[in-house]
Each structure stands twice: as C-alpha cells, then as structure tokens.
C-alpha cells in the first residue's frame, strides 16, 4: 500500500509538471534563441479552417490569460502584397465579456503549442468577436530581412520664407483637425464593412479633458484611441534591466510618447520575444518606419467593455528598451536599447502670481515631436488659466540644438487663441527643423518661460503721418504712427527716420507694420538652406508679429539668388539671370530696404501695416 501510494503521488507530480510545462510553452518559446523557428511557428500553409487554438493577453494586472480561437479561414493579400490574414473567432475566458478590444493588438495565438500569429484586425460593430490574425512568419520576415539603416537625408528640402513666416504664427495652422477631415477609410470603418487594424489606446496622464477633446480627431485619424488617464504622472526613471520574464508573449507593452509630469503612452500586446528582440501589435502603430520610442512594461487596470469599441486602461511601468521599427505587419523593439528623448522644461507664472515648473520628455520624431510639444504647452496654459475670453501670454526660452546656435523664443501672444498661439510659436519652428532633413540637426532640449495675464493688451495700427514729404538724403523726418486699442483709445508713437546719405533721388516708401506684414523675405517664393546653421539663423531672424518694424524702401530692378536679394543689377546681369540655364530667379523689380529697425515694444501688441511715400530730392 505504501509503494502504491508513492507511485500514485509520483504520477500526480509528473502530471502536474507536464501541465506546468505546457502552460509555460508560449513563454518558453518566446525566450528561445533565434534560428530554427520552424519548430516554434506553425506555417501559414498548415493553417486550416476549423482548427482550434488559444490566445493570450492581459485583461487585468500584468499576467496574461488564455481564451479560445477558432480558425475560420485565410484571406490572401488582405493587407498588402504577400501580406495575408488569418480570420478567427474568439470565445471563452474574459474574451466572452470584452470581445475584440483596443489594446489587444499583438495577442499571440497558438495551435498545438506553436505560434500562429498576432490578433491585430477586427470588423467594427461586428456582432461576433471575429478577428484578423497576422501570421508570425510575415511579422518576423519584414524585420529580419534587409534590416534598414537610417538613410542620409540627402538634399535639404526647399522652403518658402512666406510659408515659414506665416505658418509659424498662423492661428489656422494651430487649430485642431476638424472631424470633417477624417479620411474616407475611417468613416467607412464606422459602418463595420471593412477590416480595420484594432485601435491602439493612447493613455494620457496630466492632460486635461478639454485638450484631449480638441486633439482627439487628429489622434483618431492616425488610428489612436484617446482614453482617460489610468494613473498619475511619474518621475522620469532610468531604463530597467530586463530578465527572462520581461515582455514575453501575451504581456502588455507600452510605447511612451511622453514621460514625466505629462505621460502619453500607447498600449498593445507582445506577440513574440526572441532573445532581446520584441515583436508586437501585428499591424502598424503609426507607420513611422524607422523609429526610436521608449518601450515599457505595463499593467492593465481593467478592460472597459464598450458598445462602440472596448478598450483596456493600461499604465506604463519601467522602460526596458526601444521600439526601433514600425511597419506594415507590426512593431519591432530591442530590449536594453535606450531611446533618445527630448527634455522639456516649462516655467509657468499664472495670472494669479503662482509659480510652477513642469518637467517632461518627449520622443524625437519628425511627426510626433511637434504634435506632442503643441499638446504639452497648450495643456500647461489651459490647465492653469481661463479657457474662454481674451488673455495675454509672454513667452521666452530656447530650443537647444546640438552643435549649433539655439532657436531663440521671445513673443507676446494676445486674444482668445493666445494659448494655442503660444504652443504653435514653439511647435512649428521645431517642425521646420525636423522637415529640413539635415543630419546634424538634433534637438537636445527645450526650455520655456511662460507668463499669463487676463485680458488682451492689443491695438491696431490705423494710419501714419509725416512732418514733411520732401527730404534730402542724409536728413531725418519724423513719422507718427497712430494706433487704436480694443477699448477705443488712440495713442501716438513718434518715430524718427534718417534717410541714408547715399540714397539717390526718387520715391521712397515708409512702411510701419507688424512682423507678418513687413517680412522682408516674403517676396521670395522658395529657398534651399545650405546648412543647418543657415536655417536656424533664418528662423531666428524672422520678424515677430507682436513687434512693429519700420522700413524705408525704394524699388529697383534685381534678382533673387538663393536667399539673397540683389538689387540695382546692370542689364547684362539681368539678361543672364533671365535665361533657362540660370540658377537665380529674375524679378522685374526688387523692393530694396535702405533703412530698417525694430521699434521698442509698446504697452500693447500692435498689429497691422500702414505706409506713405516721400520724395528724396537733390
């Protein structure tokens, strides 16, 4: 009896160990060294209708749970050439309650212990939990073959001075995207008749709901689902060393777009881990191609069942690596590789005299960095100041650029859109840097000082007057600029103007206006900066719309070469420049500025432009 009892106990122990090993098979598979993947992957050619398997994802906490998957068939070329989808039906476990939900992207599917692929697509508003599964072979192949290296930027992009000057300060450029601009494919998804990538939940911490509401259309059009904050902002911590349990198949993973006092994180699921290589999502995140985003462990607070789109509330934990690629069949990351982030510091003085300092860091990316800056700065103001009515904001600071001079920021913004204008005054020049394609342009940090006041200290320039209309070269005339405040008050600024001694006889135009109105380069249609230093210098020299400038100008024949105007050219030179082989731009006339200066700041921000003509006599 004793021996029989021991044999029974041994048999139960063996059975328990076997069950434990079977349960750990997906994780063990994820940790196996690369090489003979055929023993771990189930080929697409072996997938048949009616097969049954299991999938793993996190519904709560950090431990993955299993549910059932029934294979319904295969759709060849469903998401692109040689990019197929396996169609499956979910059942059992927590999936009975949640169906397919945002954040499930990447959940691994196993049949007979072999990895099939990642749950990644769904039919919106489907009555059954039908999903699309990206085959694991295609997920791995797109990253393993011909691994790309970030290419040289090549030729710098042509830019327009007029576009740059107006875009930096234009309220229209700062307005959030209207829902009417959503693409037809997104609108078609509402009908449920098209297979769509499962939405990626984007969790915000420290961002007000008002800001989220304004930027939600832009985010949703990119396939992101803004969700409520699931936790407070955390301190910026160094990267954690990974271990065998870090980001194994079925666990939750977050790509952090911002960390610190503001946290913005996109959540999905790990499909497969191969050593330090991480494969996730099964569909593009933002189709960034080569990327460099913080990749973090995360835990799930809960999954919210929703008639429209169920989603998981996930909180990022420790950063463990970097997401380095974002392509058609998923995202790819490396454990132990730290991303390059841009630190941002905002010193804020509110209209009530309160002092606040906000520190956060954002990803270094052509598309994401300007958008995240816009959101962060706008939120800093809106969360601490009035949301309606006029205000005045003073902005100063620097955008530090490695190996180059910084971009200097010194602005006053007024009106009902002051907060948006302040955000754009930083975000759009940074966007110009990223668009330039110069390899040596690396933003190393951004420091901002913001002061806010209630009410708009604004005025409009109404007219100019001059003490005399005829003057000799070298003499000084007095120009009077009349401005009217929003309250109707008129005030006068007297401006002495000295005509240069070498000015020839003829008409001279006196112009007084804000920076947008008198931008001297506005006539140039296009320019190509030779290097990063020239681009930064150009941005720093742009005239500000919150300042008044005075110009004395005369009209001559000339041309535009690169970014330089060349007035008073002889006819032979003009003829040469007007040929098809010329690299210059011929102009019938060039307005040459013979005297110019920035006027001292007034109590009010004065906008508009006025001009008058005087005659230079011998």
Image: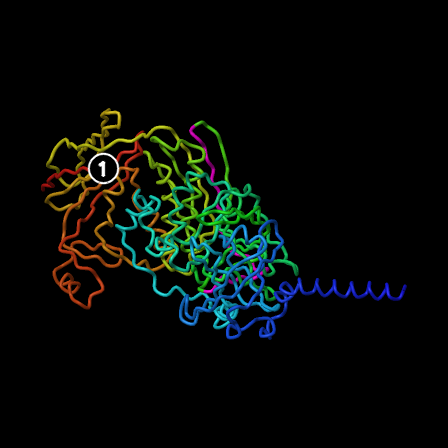
- Residue at far front of view: 1
256 versus 419 height, above or below: below
* Quadrant the N terminus occupies: bottom right
Q: Nearer the viewer, residue 183 or 353?
A: 183
* Rendered residue at 23%/32% (across/down): 460
Question: Is residue 562 found left or right of 372 in the rendered image?
Answer: left
Secondary structure of the residue carrying numbered label 1: loop
* Rendered residue at 9%/42% (across/down): 618
Question: Is residue 394 found left or right of 496 in the rendered image?
Answer: right
Q: Main secondary structure of the magenta part?
A: strand
Q: Which residues are magenta?
A: 329-351
Residue 442 image point, x, y percent = 44, 55
Label 1, on which residue? Answer: 608
Q: Nearer the viewer, residue 598 or 42?
A: 42
Report crowding for label 1: few under 14, some 14 to 19, many 20 or more residues within 10 A (C-alpha). some
Question: Is residue 447 found left or right of 489 in the rendered image?
Answer: right
Residue 209 image point, x, y percent = 44, 39
Residue 408 image point, x, y percent = 39, 45
């Amino acid at each position: 009896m004793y021996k029989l009892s021991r044999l029974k106990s041994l048999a139960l122990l063996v059975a328990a160990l076997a069950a434990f090993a079977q349960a750990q098979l997906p994780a063990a598979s994820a940790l196996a060294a690369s090489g003979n993947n055929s023993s771990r992957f189930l080929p697409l050619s072996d997938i048949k209708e009616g097969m049954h398997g299991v999938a793993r994802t996190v519904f709560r906490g950090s431990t993955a749970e299993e549910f059932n998957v029934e294979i319904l068939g295969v759709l060849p070329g469903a998401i692109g050439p040689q990019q197929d989808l396996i169609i499956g039906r979910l059942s059992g476990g927590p999936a009975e309650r949640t169906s397919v939900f945002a954040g499930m992207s990447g959940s691994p599917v196993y049949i007979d212990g072999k990895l099939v692929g990642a749950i990644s697509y769904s039919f919106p508003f489907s009555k059954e939990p039908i999903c699309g599964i990206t085959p694991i072979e295609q997920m791995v192949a797109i990253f393993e073959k011909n691994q790309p290296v970030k290419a040289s930027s090549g030729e710098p992009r042509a830019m327009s001075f007029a576009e740059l000057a107006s875009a930096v300060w234009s309220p229209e450029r700062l307005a959030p995207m209207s829902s009417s601009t959503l693409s037809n494919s997104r609108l078609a998804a509402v009908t449920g008749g098209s297979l769509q990538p499962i939405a990626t939940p984007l969790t915000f911490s420290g961002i007000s709901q008002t800001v989220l509401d304004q930027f939600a259309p832009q985010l949703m059009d990119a396939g992101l689902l803004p969700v409520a904050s699931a936790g407070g902002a955390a301190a910026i911590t160094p990267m954690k060393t990974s271990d065998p349990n870090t980001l194994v198949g079925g666990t939750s993973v977050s790509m952090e777009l911002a960390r610190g006092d503001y946290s913005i994180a996109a959540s999905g699921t790990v499909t497969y881990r191969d050593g330090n290589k991480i494969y996730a999502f099964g569909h593009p995140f933002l189709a960034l191609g080569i990327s460099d985003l913080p990749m973090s462990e995360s835990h799930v607070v809960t999954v919210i069942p929703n008639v429209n789109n169920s989603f998981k509330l996930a909180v990022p934990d420790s950063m463990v690596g970097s997401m380095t690629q974002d392509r058609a069949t998923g995202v790819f990351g490396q454990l132990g590789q730290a991303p390059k982030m841009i630190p941002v510091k905002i010193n804020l003085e509110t209209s009530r005299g309160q002092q606040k300092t906000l520190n956060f860091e954002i990803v270094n990316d052509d598309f994401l960095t300007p958008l995240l800056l816009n959101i962060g700065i706008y939120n800093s103001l809106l969360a601490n100041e009035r949301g309606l009515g006029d205000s005045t904001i003073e902005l100063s600071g620097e955008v530090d650029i490695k190996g180059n001079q910084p971009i200097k920021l010194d602005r006053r913004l007024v009106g009902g859109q002051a907060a948006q204008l302040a955000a754009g005054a930083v975000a759009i020049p940074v966007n110009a840097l990223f668009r330039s394609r110069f390899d040596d342009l690396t933003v190393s940090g951004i420091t901002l000082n913001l002061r806010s006041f209630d009410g708009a200290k604004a005025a409009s320039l109404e007219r100019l007057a001059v003490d005399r209309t005829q003057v000799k070269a070298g003499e000084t005339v007095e120009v009077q600029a009349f401005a009217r405040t929003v309250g109707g008050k008129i005030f006068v600024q007297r401006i002495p103007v000295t005509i240069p001694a070498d000015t020839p006889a003829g008409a001279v135009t006196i112009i007084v206006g804000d920076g947008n109105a008198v931008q001297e380069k506005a006539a140039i249609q296009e320019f190509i900066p030779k290097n990063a230093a020239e681009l930064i210098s150009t941005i720093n020299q742009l005239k500000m719309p919150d300042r008044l400038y005075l110009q004395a100008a005369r009209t001559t024949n000339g041309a535009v070469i690169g970014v330089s105007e060349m007035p008073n050219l002889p006819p032979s030179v003009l003829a040469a420049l007007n040929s098809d082989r010329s690299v210059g731009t011929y102009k019938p006339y060039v307005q040459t500025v013979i005297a110019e200066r920035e006027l001292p700041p007034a109590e009010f921000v004065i906008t508009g432009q006025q001009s008058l003509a005087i005659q230079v006599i011998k």
